[in-house]
Amino acid sequence: MYTPEQRRRRDESPWTLVQGILAPLQFLVFLVSLVLVVNFLLNGTGLGAATASVVVKTGILYGIMVTGAIWEKVVFGQYLFAPAFYWEDMVSMLVIALHTAYLLSWLFDWFTPAGQLWIALAAYAAYVINAAQFLLKLRAARLQEAANTAAAGTLAGAAE
């Protein structure tokens, strides 16, 4: 997944830490927002809180996407669609499109509030898929690093 040089750039980049902070923050905001959105859709109460939560979630998403693109440029030499993250980036574009569709529907008062929040739920479903992709990629990277460390230890032992 990472060449040794890419791994070095990843580990030295301050954008890795930024991603490590924004990703769990976005997930926490998502969970709170999901509860607020579902509450409104089921009970018809709390529209203001649900709306604000989706707007905040979208803002964090935009932030993580911009900083993630910078991270990808530092590590892989291109802002988006590096081969190692191609499919994650493809789904991220869908996530951004759906969140943006929600914002536009809210700003321009397209659809009913419930209709707008159904768009948010579609965005959230895509986000969950995308988050799972990134978690699987993180796990694969850790497994690769563990295998590389074990192989280096085996080679060092064989050289003695």
Image (cartoon, rainbow, N blue to C red):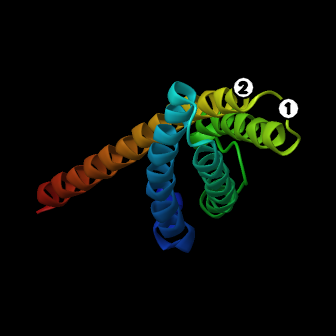
Residue under pointer 2: 115
SS for callout 2: helix
Q: Is residue 1 visible?
A: no
Quarter of the C terminus within the rendering: bottom left
**What residue is at 81 percent from the left and 36 percent from the top?**
105
Q: Quadrant of residue 99?
A: top right
User: Three-letter amino acid code at disc 1?
Assistant: Trp
> Label 2 near label 1: C-beta < 8 Å?
yes
Q: Please name whichever residue, 26 or 149, is drawn nearer the observer in this view of the structure.
A: 26
User: Would you place residue 76 above or below residue 118 in this image?
Assistant: below
Q: Measuring 44% from the left and 44% from the top, which residue is drawn there?
A: 31
Q: Nearer the viewer, residue 39 or 65?
A: 39
**Reading the chain from its start, which is encountered first: label 1 or label 2?**
1
Q: Amino acid at mark 2?
A: Gly
Q: Could you say where residue 9 lies in the image, as x and y percent from the top left?
A: 53, 67
Q: Is residue 38 above or below residue 1?
A: above
Question: Which of the 4 quarters of the picture holds residue 56?
Answer: bottom right
Given residues 135 and 13, the one toward you in this image is: 135
Q: Which residue is mark 1?
A: 110
